[in-house]
Image (cartoon, rainbow, N blue to C red):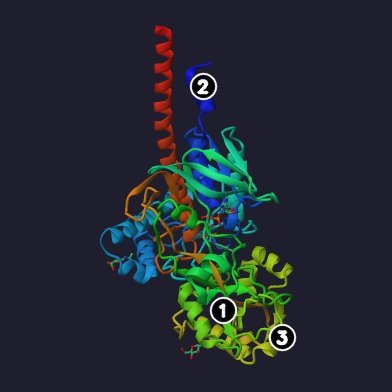
Amino acid sequence: MSVSAISTLVSSPVIVVGSGLAGLSAATQLINHDVPVQLLDSFPKAGGNSIKASSGINGAPTRFQALLDSTEAFLNDTIKSAGLAFDQSEGAEKERRQRLVNTLVHDSQSAIYWLVDEQGVDLSAVSVLGGHSAARTHRGGPGSKPPGWSIISTLLENLKQSPLFDLKLHTRVIKVLNEGEEVIGVEVQDATAKDSKKTQRLEGPVVFAAGGFAGDTHGLVKQYRPDLVGYPTTNDYREGTQPLLQEIGAGVVDMKEVQVHPTGFVDPADPTAHVKILAAEVLRGEGGILLAGTGERFVNELGTRAQVTAAIQKTADMIPIPAGAKDPANQQWEVWLVLDKTAAEKMASRLGFYRFKKLMTDMTLGDLQKHLPNALETIKSYSRNISTSTPDPFGRASFGSWTLDPESVDESTPITAGRITPVIHFTMGGVTIDSDTTVINTEGDKIKGLWAAGEITGGLHGDNRLGGSSLLECVVFGRRAGNEAAMWWKAREGQKQQGLKLQENLHKEL
Ligand SMILES: Cc1cc2nc3c(=O)[nH]c(=O)nc-3n(C[C@H](O)[C@H](O)[C@H](O)COP(=O)(O)OP(=O)(O)OC[C@H]3O[C@@H](n4cnc5c(N)ncnc54)[C@H](O)[C@@H]3O)c2cc1C
Ligand SMILES: *[C@@H]1O[C@H](CO)[C@@H](O)[C@H](O)[C@H]1NC(C)=O
Ligand SMILES: *[C@@H]1O[C@H](CO)[C@@H](O)[C@H](O)[C@H]1NC(C)=O
């Protein structure tokens, strides 16, 4: 056996923590560089919150967009959405944020083409999400599975073809190991074991892609945003992992910036549940409107998430919580999401799941009127405004597939509707990274042997993340993390092999 083959066998793989899109993108890149990967996840199933993503992934400009778009327009939208956190930052921090935003936007086209052309994911349909000036959020064509599911399952399937790839589920990282300034591995625990004292050390450089803390209601959410503890969430319950990196000196930013998504479904069977299914933003992008308990519209449904959420809280009534409910999500508002027949047809494959779960129901306008007194009048007037190109009083500029003829609107008009309420959805804050994904410590220096990508990182989105930009950040920065860790690993291997050769020659000479 050659020296290099031996050293490949004995060398430790790059450790990737988290099997969501950021982790899988990093792992794919590492494998492409012929670097072995040990992927770890504490959950029994791979995919994290990424697998639940339901609207799509941004990219501009791409060949799938029918209308003109540009990286500059996407950049402007992103900076506008990032708000004061971006505008008011200064000096080196401002430059860091600018680098992150520029990298996200400029790498967006190649991220989409990488997923489509190299990995084989269908992303041929685009729609406009809130806060975007163009249709640039990509998902699969008619009849396809939701984008998170199709992207994750494709990448995972491709990775499993490689003998260099190893996935360990049920494995929770509880500590990051360092020697001086350098990260040398992690300490893990069997996430299913009753005896939680048993731990194991794994050595190697580490890519951290462990996601956000929007599902850590009673942990980091409570610590940074006690005002949001009563809100339901779209995230599975998971502990935030930023503290593991803070322990070894990593800085964090924007930890108070928690995104509340305006539309989580209120399940009629369990209205006060903490974990809710997201009513994908694309439902509004493709035509859905929001009605308050009065049956009236009250907002541009395609404003940013922060704007729509604020309007709901200002206009809608709070839902009373039954006495005696255990740990209820007690901050909920009465709002309905309504699609006309053509918008519902456009969303048919998605609605199948929501109908099955009884989160959206096919009914007539007469049925809806029973809950929402002015719904019929509103829908007639809204449809008339669209058909006569009357400017929308709330500033909505695109109406998706809503084509209802105002003259035909009566109590028998079929619609599809469900109740929604704002939900904690995403955490903008996280560990500080630079655009090459190295983790920055509280002094502003790079930590060696450690990279981070995806929702665990902070600063890119500022005050508000645009829909579709999270999957994008996972691909863009996940791939970068993979490249950086691969270079690091190869440099180390080079040193090791030189060391081995030296030893061999020494033996020969002796
Ligand atoms: C319902 C829903 C819909 C969404 N829709 C969209 C969308 O359409 N477009 C978009 O851009 N974004 C969307 N998002 C946001 C986006 O999906 C996530 O922000 C993004 O996927 C995060 O990816 P990630 O790889 O950083 O983390 P995740 O996908 O959450 O993966 C992190 C993984 O790390 C593991 N982990 C955590 N801690 C540890 C530990 N200590 N040890 C070992 N493993 C650990 C977790 O178990 C998890 O599997 C949506 C989110 C939700 C919840
Ligand atoms: C982006 O913003 C800059 C600065 O405000 C402006 O000059 C430019 O026209 C904008 N570009 C697009 C495409 O919106
Ligand atoms: C239709 O437009 C008119 C005029 O701007 C406005 O008063 C009305 O509220 C609009 N209807 C709906 C339902 O948006």
The answer to which of 298 and 124 lies nearer the viewer is: 298
Q: Which element is circle 3 on?
A: helix
Mark 1 CB in 8 Å range of ligand 3? no
Q: Is residue 18 above or below residue 30?
A: below
- Image quarter of residue 320: bottom right
Q: Which element is circle 1 on?
A: strand
Residue occupying the point 58% across, 68% down:
218
CB under 8 Å between discs 3 and 2: no
Local crowd size for mark 2, using a 10 Å CA cut-off: few (<14), some (14–19), many (≥20):
few
Residue that badge 3 annotates = 367
Question: First in sequence: mark 1 or mark 3?
Answer: 1
The answer to which of 58 and 423 lies nearer the viewer is: 423
The answer to which of 208 and 223 lies nearer the viewer is: 223
Q: Left or right: 386 with respect to 492? A: right
Where in the figure is residue 60, as x and y percent of width and height? 42, 57
Residue occupying the point 50% across, 51% down:
209
Residue that badge 1 annotates = 289
Residue occupying the point 40% across, 12% down:
505
Q: Left or right: 91 with respect to 351? A: left
Kind of residue at badge 1 = Ile
- Of the numbered discs in the image, which one, if any, rests on residue 5? 2
The answer to which of 376 and 464 lies nearer the viewer is: 464
Kind of residue at badge 2 = Ala
Kind of residue at badge 3 = Asp
Total numbered labels placed on residues in the image:
3
